[in-house]
Amino acid sequence: MESPQAARSIMDSPSRPLPWLPALLRLLVLLLALRPLGVLGAPAYPGLTGAWRIDVPKPFGVTVQTFLVLHQEGERLTGRVYPNGSHDIPIEGVHAEGKDILFGMEWGWNFRVRPEGANLRVVITRGDGGTENVLAVPIPEESLRPSGVLPIPAVRDLPDNGLARTPPMGWNSWNHFAEAVDDRVIRETADAMVSSGMAAAGYVYVNIDDTWEGGRDAQGNIVPNRKFPDMKALADYVHAKGLKFGLYTGPGPVTCDGYVGSYGHEEQDARTFAAWGVDYLKYDWCSAGNLYSVPQSRQVYQKMGEILGRCGRPMVFSLGASIASQSATWGAAAGANLWRTASDIQDTWKKMSLVGFEQPSLAKYAGPGHWNDPDMLEIGNGGMSAAEYRTHLSLWCLLAAPLIAGNDLRTMSAETRDILTNREVIAVDQDALGRQGIRLAARDGMELWARPLAGGATALGIFNRGEAQAAASFTWAEAGLSGRPSSGRDLWAHAGVEPADEGMRATVPAHCVVMWVVR
Ligand code: GLA
């Protein structure tokens, strides 16, 4: 670059050939400087290209990181979000509002960004209404690319671990508490599990989901964050109630919510969990998807399945979703007792119906020791009516699904408790034959589902997915039976029913179910 001295000497020269050139250059420099402010056809998205890191500190001493990779070409902005450092989701709906650029992504997260010095000011609004006003700092994009991944074992069939002969029953913190789970919540939940009658009805696992993790100590041991001062003491407390204790991690470097995962520490973590007294491990795919392909997920999960098999403590092994429904075909062989078959449930009729009624039938993969998992229960969380929650439980029981309650057991209403502890419906779920039920017929918004039970009985459910109470009638042939059963029992009315010659007939309120066992 020309020194001021040199510039002056040119301008002062008495024989200047182009006297207006310096002024023109100055004007050009000025216009270029003004370009991002809207002069000279400014790009709508100035200075966003690059990789950015957002640190979100949590009150319990953990910082979770989200990354943005943005690429601006003229007025076009494309890019990806790594929410909580897990997943990899394209941005969508890009538009400008004044100097702010707005975009969204699947999951209902919305971003409002604007350059601030060398950084970006970012306001993140999540689907649940939570908002964070944070700074994104530039980072080298290469730092987001994995530099080689750890090897995975060759595919092989692991032996059955002998657990979960019937679908696991218990409770998990995620659906109600998410990040707001701590030692006190777990102790009080264990108390409530016993005092409410849930334990007596068969619920046994008390499972902490994501957000318990603190990081690793100098020896690489995983440690809990400040919410859980002593995991072993907590597990002891749960065990002393006659209950079992469950925990969450995943095969990736971070979990779905951005906490430390078990990648590269699988063996060490399994030993730690065994020493704490863990009886059930939920192992969630999340950021492993940034390192391994979907077909490789079998081997990634199998790796942990093998480790759990030799860690010296029986642990129910529960797989998160890699890609909905694929893990059903090999989940048992990878050592798992259950695997997610659908995306995350929500406490709405729409999402619960989608997850429960609309999955392709994976019934043939379910059986004693290995179960399809349409996700945890939302019963009692307040987003559905009692009728809808009855449908939720009945459907899960016909599906031979794990019954993992997801509400606040400490404060649940008597109505919620009565739904969750309906022993006649639970008996269908826990039937020893272990065959998953299927939909046999559907007409006018009414669906007939059936599940064969041990001893030749059949569980039947007529679900009314319509918006008004209606009468339904299905023939015994439609129910897969050769003729009229001799006896029946209504599992919600807790009363005997007289099967009619023509078939199963019932009047079903909107979004509700009539459930029978016939012999
Ligand atoms: C995923 C799982 C959820 C829960 C969260 C925790 O979304 O599907 O059940 O475990 O991760 O981050």
Image (spheres, rainbow, N blue to C red):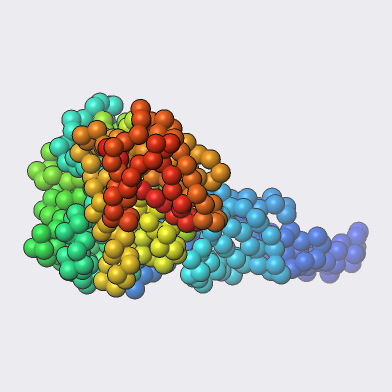
Residue at image point 72% right, 60% down: 44
Residue 11 shown left or right of residue 379 in the figure: right
Q: Would residue 94 be visible to someone looking at this image? A: yes
Q: Name the one closer to the observer, 336 or 168.
A: 168
Picture coordinates of residue 282, whole percent (x, y): 27, 49
User: Could you tell me which quadrant the N terminus lies in?
Assistant: bottom right
* Quadrant that contains the C terminus: top left
Q: In this view, does 456 lie above or below 228?
A: above
- Drawn side of residue 312 relative to residue 196, left or right: left
Q: Which residue is drawn at 11% across and 63% down?
A: 241
Whether residue 39 sits left or right of residue 378 in the image: it is right
* The one of 425 and 503 positioned closer to us in this rendering: 503
Q: Which residue is drawn at 21% across and 30% down?
A: 158
**Which percent across, then down, holds residue 50?**
56, 54
355 or 504: nearer the viewer:
504
Query: Taking the image as drawn, is residue 353 in sight?
Result: no
